[in-house]
Amino acid sequence: MILFRYTKIYGAEYVSHLDVLRHLGRTFTRAGIKVGYSQGYHPHKLIYMSAPIGVGMKSLSEYCVVDTTESAETFKEKFNEYSPKGIKCLGAWETPKKVGVASDIVKAKYRIKGIKEFSIGEVLDKKSFIITDREGQEKDVRDLIYSVKREGEDLICVLGFGNGLRAEKFAAALKEKFGGGDIDITKEEALIADGTPFENILKNIWL
């Protein structure tokens, strides 16, 4: 099996999660990357993707596991030859078994542009931080805000991922509270529970 990290940029951020899955399958076919199939009446390629991000959010840190016997080096070379500009493999690793791309990524680091400057303590020193979720309900997500800092005009935030806090909702709440213009969000790293990049999980498999 291969675990690989890929991008969603240059317009690919507007492609839905399901359509990216279809694209990956077609890319493997064009590249001649042989992929294992499930059993049963409706076999499908064994491709396992990390949890979806919001349409329109750029990412440098999407992950996928694919059942293939390709080496990591040839996989990356073949994939990038046949994939479009916005979806490129940044790294590939061989793994003896499927890893939890949907379950073990519990945090993410984001770069958020477009929020006016404010005191970071207005977020981190508070006991609560309320957002409005997709159902229109107010929700306290303070426990899922791990860090917020300024880097030039940008905000660098580590937030919970796949567990009730969407970066676009967090950014919208900041804009409503502190002001800002057009919001631009890039997911720069997918992280496991200890705050390290997701591919570090392979160290536990190989030990």
Image (cartoon, helix red, strand yellow):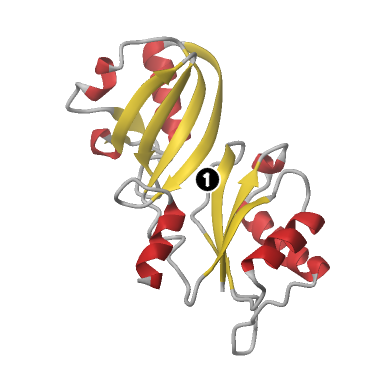
Q: Identify the residue at horizontal 60%, vertical 53% (top origin).
A: 17
Three-letter code for the amino acid on which mark 1 is drawn:
Ile
Q: Within 10 Å of the Cα at label 1, are there few (<14), some (14-19), or many (20+) other Cα atoms?
A: some
Q: For mark 1, what is the residue?
A: 53
Q: Is residue 17 left or right of residue 96?
A: right
Q: Identify the residue at horizontal 54%, vertical 56% (top origin).
A: 63
User: Relative to 115, is 27 above or below?
Assistant: below
Q: What element carries label 1?
A: loop
Q: Identify the residue at horizontal 68%, vertical 77% (top origin).
A: 35
Residue 47 appears in the figure: no
- Which picture quadrant has residue 128? top left
User: Relative to 35, is 79 above or below?
Assistant: above
At which x and y percent is residue 37?
64, 82
Residue 130 appears in the figure: yes
At which x and y percent is residue 131?
34, 30
- Residue at the left extreme of this rendering: 127
Q: Identify the residue at horizontal 58%, vertical 37% (top origin).
A: 57
